[in-house]
Amino acid sequence: MSAIALTLGPVFFHWSPDRLSDFYRRIADEAPIDRVHVGEVVCGKRMPFSDPAWPEIIERLERAGKEVVLSTLAAPATVRERRSIEDLCTDERLVEINDVTALPSRSGKPFVTGPFLNVYNEASARFLIQRGATTICPPVELSLAAVGAMAGACPETEFEIFAFGRLPLALSGRCYHARIHGLHKDSCQFTCERDPDGLAVDTLDDQQFLAINGVQTLSNQVQAFCPAPADLTSRGVRRIRLSPHTCDMVEVAKTYRALADGREDPKAARFILSCLDLPSTLVDGYAHGKPGWQAATSI
Amino acid sequence: MTSGRMELVCPAGTPATLRAAVQAGADAVYCGFRDETNARNFPGLNFSAEELAEGVRFAHDHGSKVLVAINTFARVNDVGLWKKAADTAAECGANAIIAADIAVLDHVAKNHKQVRLHLSVQAAAATPEAIGFYATSFGIRRVVLPRVLSVQEIAALNRAIEVETEAFVFGGLCVMIEGRCYLSSYATGKSPNLNGVCSPPEMVSYDDEPNSTAARLSGFTIDRYEPGEPVGYPTLCKGKFKAGGKTSYLFEDPVSLNAGGMIAGLKAAGVTALKIEGRQRGKGYVTEVVRAFRKAVDAVEQGGDAIEIDRILAGQSEGSRQTAGAYSKKWR
């Protein structure tokens, strides 16, 4: 049993049920990942498409020995969305909370707090731990030092750092995919499905900057924080989160597994990741307490 | 749900604007300390403990309340600074503390039961369950509503919750859900949640180029202006960007919020208090806006019609473009 565990976070993008099934089949069969999050977190309007696919995906993942976590919506609004959160919170599996809406129905049962929930300090962390938080994945803008300080103050709980994927930077009531296509959110025509890794947003001077995914804004650049195992274990950080993209996520998982086991050094791991079919360049500024866009480096 | 007179909550970035807002007719003013515990941590703004105590005396003498914003998220290993700010606000006689962080809410609930707790917009609580959680856990009395809800949704929410609601009606407009936006730290390293700033001025540059001026934030071009065109502040979410083969104000046009025309609708939706944004604004601006909104709110309370309200607020645009934001459903 290795000291550092790997989590596959929820898919942020509007993938078809077929793409989701194919993706998780490979994860189940080939990826050295301990825990897999499933479910829609960005937009409740997508749920009728993906909902029918989840039972089989969950069954397949669990049969392969993965721990499945049910992720919940980050910005619930409608009655249907709120009810979906309440329903998921009754599940015996672990649930990921991404909005305070889920807390009343999950309090007292174990849960993960996702990066959309504002846990910035040890006092907030303790409050949530008392109510059932067993894993805390803090907001992406926090540095490894800050996450480590929380982990040090709450040794009974597992802290997880967002290590790979476009960074979830903002949510809005407005859908930008709809807006860019001259539509409104209520009649969006699901144009977000055309961009399975998000749609790149560049500045007027063609600098790569952000990406949109419906109501969500992500970084254009791909977080690829590759710490040496001791950088995490010395701070009490025991989990690494990888966020799904259309690139070869099995290879990403293998790379991080090798990194966490000390079989690959950070520089080599970054090189392997940079050779994959990623939507942009690699960054890890946040982990070092710097602007998020800054290029990936060693600690 | 409220049947009383709506409360007008006005910004006070300095002791001088606090007095100006009170004299212009604010039912309540909101302000913060001169540090990173509040979400308008700008140079030259905010209050020392002494200034707050004096401001509270002045406001109370004139029948106004003071709400103190301690609404950033406490830094790890430094929560004491946020707790101390809450203690000071309570000692100064603040009527309410506006907070978002669970650590701050918990501290106030346990140690200052006489001070009302208002849930900051930075907490992004938009559902009955979320608001109910804060009410049950910390006894919050009011929630400042995230600027993503339509008037219809606010009405439905008010029917489902026990606490008061406060809605923004005028000033800057965040298009992202506040308290859950890290765009600023992605570009600059500083963010509302961590530092109480968004798109900080020290990272801004205006670069003169052949036939244009580029407004940049941390080197990222946020907008570009032709000669003679008024140059705007490069707030990240109001920038012009390229995406999907189009160049546009992708997130939001450079507009500000004016929901003056929605005051009657917000009252009917059960909103208790109306909030004017702008603690970074000067005395003259605050006086003028507060005076106009005082008249508008009073006119609505007395059953004034939409034309009268429009006339009262007609001068409040500063020549810039305005929107009713998410209160109108098609904004989304």
Image (tube, coloured by chain):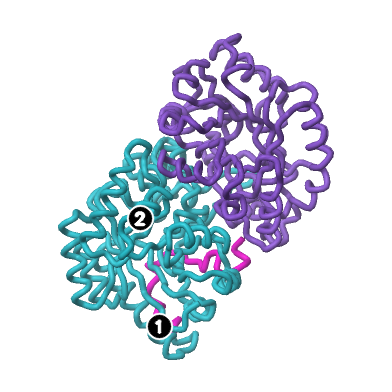
What mark, if any, has residue B110 been given in the picture?
2
Viewer-side residue, B209 vs A40: A40
Q: Is residue B228 visible?
A: no
Q: Secondary structure at mark 2?
A: helix
Residue occupying image coordinates x 54% and y 72%:
B158
Give the magenta-colored segment's residue range: B309-332
What percent of the width, then of the height, locates residue A279?
Answer: 65, 30
Colour for chain B in the figure: cyan
Q: Is residue B302 left or right of residue A108?
A: left
Q: Amino acid at mark 1?
A: Arg
Q: Quadrant of residue B156?
A: bottom right
Report x, y in % for residue B233.
39, 51
Type of amino acid under label 2: Lys
Q: Is residue A51 left or right of residue A2?
A: right
* Both marks 2 and 1 on one chain: yes
Could you say whether the residue bearing mark 1 is in a helix, strand or loop? loop
Work out whether B152 lies above or below B70. below
For the colour purple, the matching chain is A
* Dot 1 alpha-carbon crowd within 10 angstroms: few under 14, some 14 to 19, many 20 or more: some
Is the C terminus of chain B in the top left, top right, bottom left or bottom right quadrant?
Answer: bottom right
**Is there any visible trace of residue B164 in the rendered image?**
yes
N-term-proximal mark, 2 vs 1:
1
User: From this viewpoint, which residue is outermost toward the top?
Assistant: A263
Residue highlighted by disc 1: B5
User: Distance of mark 2 from mark 1, alpha carbons?
Assistant: 31 Å
Residue drawn at point x = 59 percent, y = 40 percent = A112
Within the magenta stretch, is there residue B319? Answer: yes
